[in-house]
Image (spheres, helix red, strand yellow):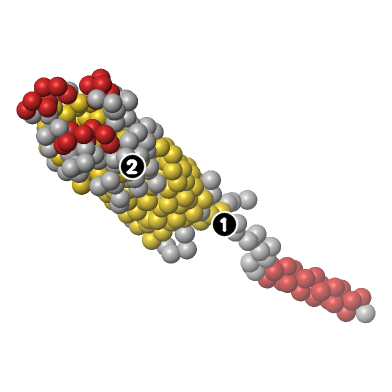
Amino acid sequence: MRNIVRGAVAAIALGTAAVSAHAADLPSIKAPPPAPVFVDTYQPFQIRLKVGSLIPLDGTAKIYDAGAVHPTLAALGVPGGSVGVATGLSAGYGSLVPGASTSISTSVIPMLDVAYYLTKNWAIEAICCVSPHHIQGTGVLAGSSLAHTWAFPPSVMLQYHFTNFGAFQPYLGVGVNFTTFWGTRAGNNNWALNFAPNSIAAGLGAFGANASFYSASITPSWGVVGQAGADYMFNEHWGVNVDVKYIMVEPNAHANIVAFIPGPVGAALNPVFVPVNAAVKINPLVVSAGLTYRFGGDWGVPKLLPF
């Protein structure tokens, strides 16, 4: 009986050892890893170098008589004189000079844009350029060169960027513009100023004069800006950009004309000074293209955060 019991115990022990050895050969079972966490990061800083064309959509002006002062004209019974009484071009001081306007040249310039992304979709952008322009007279001022000037029109934009089209990333923007003018100088060219038949000068036998703008100034202008454009990104840093902006620029200009009347009438009246004020509408369309560079992070690349 004892031998039977001892044999059973030995068999059980041998079986337990075999099971333990087999279990040791099996792979261990571990808990599943935590789900990965993805963070959609973006480049917070951006710079663009571009070439743009500033195209005045209007360029016209309303020219107002600013009241020429001429001792001889006043002595003839015309107190103070004016563009109107001297030339017949208007009804007198403060009145609109009919048929007088301007045109403004287009300019091709380098441009710099700097942006900071508040999120991957919203950005604030500052736009800067310096643009040369030539203002010429039209209508009764045809042939005159009113002024040459440089425009400095910085703008600040709030933009929304669409990032659900992959590498193609269009955007819309709205902002404010402040345009100031510097280096303004009068055209100083000679042109024919024709007197109206009902003017005093024409009544005295003078029908025209050799005129020239000899001074000019342009006031600063505030306006709104609308913008639409798109970037195509080759990688997380580099891309190309096209952009169109409409800028409201409507400054006031002040200019002075000096006119010399030929013949005996001119001997009594010369020189005739004609100051004018102008409400100028430039309202340019700015079309540009160039390179985009983004830095300070990874644009649209999901990042796996380890635990």
Residue in front for this viewpoint, 164 or 126: 126
State the residue at coordinates (12%, 37%). Answer: 207
The quarter of the displayed image where residue 253 is located: top left
Point out the image quarter for the N terminus: bottom right
Q: Earlier in the sequence, mark 2 or mark 1?
A: 1
Tag 1: Cα neighbours inside 10 Å, few (<14), some, or many (≥20)? few
Residue in front for this viewpoint, 129 or 153: 153
Asked if the residue under mark 1 is in contact with the one under mark 2, i.e. CB atoms within 8 Å, the reply is no
Left or right: 286, with 302 as reference point: left
The quarter of the displayed image where residue 153 is located: top left
User: What numbered label is drawn on residue 251?
Assistant: none
Disc 1 target residue: 38
Q: Amino acid at mark 1?
A: Phe
Q: Which element type, helix, strand or loop, lies under badge 2?
A: loop
- Report the Cα–Cα distance between label 2 and label 1: 67 Å
Q: Amino acid at mark 2?
A: Leu
User: What numbered label is drawn on residue 96?
Assistant: 2
Q: Which element type, helix, strand or loop, lies under badge 1?
A: strand
Q: Residue 104: horizontal and vertical position, in percent?
A: 24, 44
Q: Residue 126: horizontal and vertical position, in percent?
A: 42, 40
* Count of picture labels: 2
Residue in front for this viewpoint, 121 or 103: 103
Residue in front for this viewpoint, 241 or 33: 241
Left or right: 122, with 65 as reference point: right
From the viewer's perspective, is residue 256 above or below residue 8?
Answer: above
State the residue at coordinates (76%, 74%). Answer: 15
Left or right: 196, with 223 as reference point: left
Q: Residue 52: horizontal and vertical position, in percent?
A: 27, 47
